[in-house]
Amino acid sequence: MTRADIYRKLDEVFQDVFDDESIHVSDETTANDIEDWDSLEHINLMVAVENAFGIKFNMGQIGSLKNVGEMVDLIEKKVG
């Protein structure tokens, strides 16, 4: 799975979780860029990402993510 494939799937996940078809994430995307991305929605988002990619994150990994680029790096390692 390429980074582009991961981003395409993440766009779908983010659009579904935040109910906003206009969302397109990039390496620099953070919670500050998406209006409804708060701590509760972060948990929903991470569960949706885990389900979409068939992977599991631990709490340390989830807590350390600073942007979507770091999420993609982690997904690459887990699905690689």
Image (cartoon, rainbow, N blue to C red):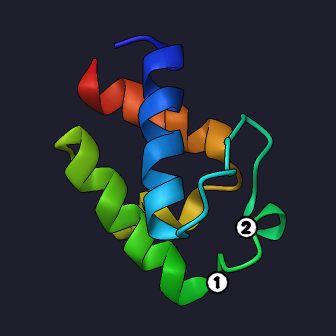
Name the residue beneath numbered marker 2: 31
Give the left or right position of residue 36, taking residue 46 as reference.
right
Image check: 1 left or right of 35? left
Q: Secondary structure at mark 2?
A: helix
Q: What distance separates the C-alpha of mark 1 from that of mark 2?
A: 7 Å
In the displayed orientation, state which residue is furthest to the bottom. 40
What is the quadrant of the C terminus in the image? top left
- Residue 15, above or below 28: below
Vertical position of residue 46 compared to residue 51: above or below? below
Residue that extends furthest to the front in the rendered view of this protein: 21
Percent coordinates x, y for residue 13 in the rendering: 43, 52
Amino acid tagged 1: Asp
Q: Secondary structure at mark 1?
A: loop
Amino acid on which disc 2 is placed? Ala
Q: Residues within 10 Å of mark 1 (few under 14, many from 20)?
A: few
Residue drawn at (21%, 53%) of the image: 51
Q: Which residue is mark 1?
A: 38
Residue 76 to residue 56: above or below: above
Q: Quarter of the image holding residue 20?
A: bottom right
Q: Residue at x 47, y 63 (%)?
A: 62
**First in residue order: circle 1 vs circle 2:** 2
Q: Nearer the viewer, residue 6 or 73?
A: 6
Instruction: Give percent across and percent down for residue 48.
Output: 32, 61
Q: Are marks 1 and 2 in contact (CB under 8 Å)?
A: yes
* Whether residue 56 can be seen here: no
Front residue of 40/78: it is: 40
Judge from the rendering whether residue 70 lies leftward or rightward of residue 76; answer left or right. Answer: right
Quadrant that contains the N terminus? top left
Which residue is drawn at the image coordinates 52% and 55% (left, top)? 14
